[in-house]
Amino acid sequence: MNVITTTIVAFLVVVIIFAVIFIVKSFATPKKLGSVQKFMKEGKFQAAEKAAKAILSKNPRDYLTHYWLGRVYLAQKKDDLAFMEFKTVNENAIFNGDIPEVPFRHTMALLYQKFNDNTNALKEHLLLIKREPDNAENYYNAGICAEKENQVNNAVVMFQKAIALNKRHSKAHSALGHLLLRSEQYEDALSEIKLSIRLDPDEFSNYYYLGKALKERGEYSDAIKAFEKSERSNEFRQRALIETGACYMEVDQTANAQEYFQRAVQCSKDDSSQETLYARYFLANCYEKTHSIEKAVEQWNKIYLYNKKFRDVASKLEEYRDIQSNDSLKEYLTSSQPAFTELCIKTVQKAYNFMPQKSEAKPYGCRLLCTEENKDTWKNVRKQFFLIEFHRDSDAVDESKVRQFVEEIKTQGYYKGMIFSSSGFSTLATQFAESRPVILINREKLEIVLSKAGI
């Protein structure tokens, strides 16, 4: 009996010792955690961090302390470390009141978004919607994350629910307008964006999207006004300048377009960004249209430096590669309009013995109406007229232009026609011309003709 009694007593002593240790720890941890909270309140963040780490070194599964250490990191703007602590809490803690769940989930969602984990951010916002179903902000934030995850229909629903709860939620109206714009629902997009502007006229990004919608409807003048207002936004300034330039291109005001593309390049903060590359690309298009080919090549080279596969830049550089070594082609492509007309007249005179009867400058180049030079002037020979076009724009001459040209030859009773093009001809244009009274002169043949004419 004594042995049994001794054993029972020893067992009870062990149980009591463990119970005391547990109780002491239970009281000690809050006390130590209280010091973390005290240091936080006093703004002594390094001391709070040190105290929290001391607790976790003895008990890594103390998720309440992990939570407070995350708050300490947030206060020190160490968001990456805070994110790690909060993820540990989110994956393991039981929200029983010690950790305020709703504020925690708001913070957790923002951290997920900051570190581009929109999938988990969306999950947090959906949990918040369950806990705060009447909070419009939760639906709006869920919509933003859904949009980034390319869940467009889900995003639209979320924005609509946010608006249903708060009709004055300008950001929700704006976000919904952007999505409607992307899906080419321009009327509805305009309605939402205009409403957002009325609610918050100082949100200048909305004017950018207003301009986009107006531009798609062909209302270029109003679109330009909207883009000019959006330039006040640092985030949207470069894009607004590019879009303004694009509007001017649509109405063939190349000089104005060029000015805005130049400004877009000048305000660039990143030469490799897509916006800057597009600004340079469109600027090069303006230079090409005005036959400032060397300036265009300069822009294409700068684009090629950062992105060798950007649109048709590589083919443009190849197309104009021989300009530096071919003076006649360079003069053909880069001379001013009056000088170009004189060049075309000289070409037909020297290379074909034609006598120009009429010359006319055209957007694509030059048009001449010629007759053959008749040295036997005493003979009463009926003159035969030749219609000749010189093209130097960047687009290949297509079938419709050749067809229209041939129709004019027949209507006017001309003998034959010739079309010169530095950019060549489409396959259908070449096939169409085979059995018609027109001769097509491509780039290679043009170089030979210019050389023969002494250009």
Image: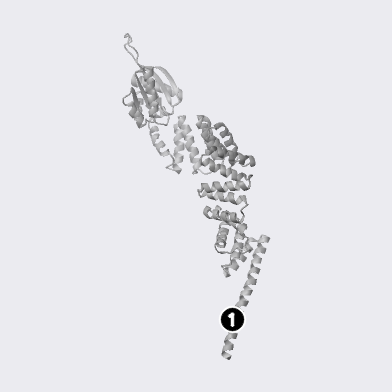
Number of numbered callouts drawn: 1
Give the camera-side residue of 161 and 426.
161
Decide: is 196 above or below 286: below
Q: Is residue 151 left or right of residue 392?
A: right
Picture residue at 35% right of the left edge, 27% below the top: 446
Locate residue 247, reporting x and y percent: 52, 33
**Against 289, is 142 above or below?**
below
Up the image or down, 388 lies above or below 58; here it is above
> Which residue lies under the disc numbered 1?
14
Q: Is residue 2 above or below residue 128?
A: below
> Residue 158: x and y, percent?
56, 48
Q: Is residue 16 visible?
A: yes
Q: Specify few, some or many for label 1: CA neighbours under 10 Å numbering under 14, 14-19, or 20 or more.
A: few
Question: In the image shown, does 331 or 397 lie closer to the viewer?
Answer: 397
Q: Residue at x 57, y 33 (%)?
A: 222
Q: Quadrant of the C terminus?
A: top left
Would you say 257 lies left or right of 134 here?
Answer: left
In the image as oriented, which residue stretches furthest toward the right? 42
Which of 250 and 443 lies nearest the eye of the viewer?
A: 250
Q: Coloring scheme of the render?
A: one colour
Q: Position of residue 351 (x, y in %)?
A: 34, 22
Q: Amino acid at mark 1?
A: Val
Would residue 200 be visible to someone looking at this image? no
Give coordinates of residue 120: x percent, y percent.
53, 55
Based on the displayed image, in which of its 4 quarters is residue 238 positioned?
top right
Q: Residue furthest bottom?
A: 1
Q: Quadrant of residue 371?
A: top left
* SS label for mark 1: helix
Where's the N terminus, which quadrant?
Answer: bottom right
